[in-house]
Amino acid sequence: MTRTLSIEAEFTRYPGPRYRKDGPYSGEEFREVLLEPRLKQAIYSHEKLEVILDKVSGYGSSFLEEAFGGLVRCGFTKKQITENLEIVADTPRFTHHKLRALSYIDDALKRK
């Protein structure tokens, strides 16, 4: 079974900065409030979590790095991420955001 997390529908259409202290709808808030708990549920249930990037105004690199690279810094393993997380961009406009999010995960794994 696959679980779905739409940033636009469940968090905001206007993603913000890296940290909560820098403004609303931060990557840190998204990761702590939605992404980490949902990914933990998916891991526990042996399911995949699809995070849908589409339908928002856009993403700053700091939001994506904190949300997705931050998973590694919070203790998720490469195996857990690769087996249980899928980042989805259904429209061409968001494909580069997907690739950036994946690269932030890879970069964080290399630094670990």
Image (spheres, rainbow, N blue to C red):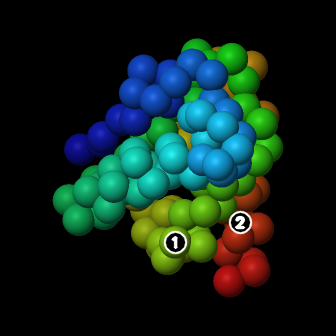
Which quadrant does the N terminus fall into? Answer: top left
Q: Earlier in the sequence, mark 1 or mark 2?
A: 1
Label 2: which secondary element: helix
Task: Name, please, the residue furthest toward the front.
Answer: 21
Task: Name, please, the residue furthest toward the left.
Answer: 45
Three-letter residue code for mark 2:
Asp
Residue at 70%, 44% (x, y): give it: 22
Q: Is residue 59 left or right of residue 41?
A: right
Q: Position of residue 74 (x, y in %)?
A: 52, 72
Q: Is residue 9 left or right of residue 25?
A: left
Label 1: which secondary element: loop
Which quadrant does the C terminus fall into? Answer: bottom right
**Quadrant housing residue 90:** top right
Picture layout, residue 105 above or below residue 51: below
Picture layout, residue 95 above or below residue 111: above
Tell me the residue that label 1 is attached to: 74
Checking the image for residue 26, the label placed there is none
Tell me the residue that label 2 is attached to: 106
State how many labels appear: 2
Residue at 76%, 47% (x, y): give it: 62
Circle 1 packing at 10 Å, graded few (<14), some (14-19), many (20+), is few
Three-letter residue code for mark 1:
Cys
**Quadrant housing residue 9:** top left
